[in-house]
Amino acid sequence: EYVSKNKHTSLNDLAKELNISTRQLARIFNNKYGCSFTQKITGLRMEKALRYLKKGENIADVAQKTGYSSTKGFYSAFTSIYGVTPGEYKKNNSNKKHLS
């Protein structure tokens, strides 16, 4: 919940909020999710991005809403995970109906 409300959170920020060490929090994430904090956050961001793109939202807005400080960084992360650009994904998966 904390992570979803704070787009720009870091492992250190969350550890401070929980009053535990960053090392301890990193271990908790690895044990619970089988991945690093960064991988988990990126996964959550990308799940949100997919929902926004399916709704036909603007890519720059999606980048901002999912916590990316630049559209370029968002494009890079999205493409490395899904193998297509956000624009390609949006084009092929948008829920908007197109009139002919």
Image: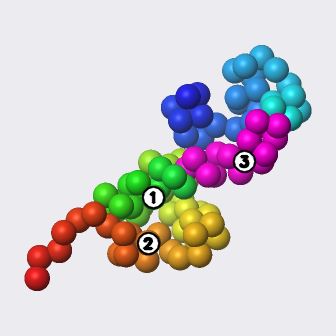
Point out the stretch of residues depicted in magenta: 29-45
Q: Which residue is mark 1?
A: 50
The residue at the point 63 percent across, 52 percent down is: 42
CA distance separating discs 1 and 2: 8 Å
Above or below for 25 versus 50: above
Location of the C terminus (image quadrant): bottom left
Is tag 1's residue or tag 2's residue first in the polypeptide sequence? 1
Identify the secondary structure beneath mark 3. Answer: helix
Q: Nearer the viewer, mark 3 or mark 2?
A: 2
Residue 32 lies in the magenta-colored region = yes
Q: Give the total number of marks visible in the rendering.
A: 3
Q: 10 Å neighbourhood of mark 2: few (<14), some, or many (≥20)?
A: some
- Out of 32 and 4, give the one closest to the viewer: 32
The residue at the point 86 percent across, 35 percent down is: 27
Q: Is residue 72 visible?
A: no
Q: Which residue is mark 3?
A: 38
CA distance separating discs 3 and 2: 23 Å
- Out of 99 and 72, give the one closest to the viewer: 99
Above or below for 50 versus 72: above
CA distance separating discs 1 and 3: 18 Å
- Among the 4 quarters of the image, the one containing residue 98: bottom left
Q: Which mark is residue 3?
A: none
- Horizontally, residue 67 falls left or right of residue 9, namely left
- Among the 4 quarters of the image, the one containing residue 81: bottom right
Identify the secondary structure beneath mark 1. Answer: helix
Is tag 1's residue or tag 3's residue first in the polypeptide sequence? 3
Provide the major secondary structure of the magenta segment.
Answer: helix
Amino acid under disc 2: Tyr
Q: Which mark is residue 89?
A: 2
Residue 8 position in % (x across, y down): 60, 40
- Horizontally, residue 37 falls left or right of residue 68, namely right
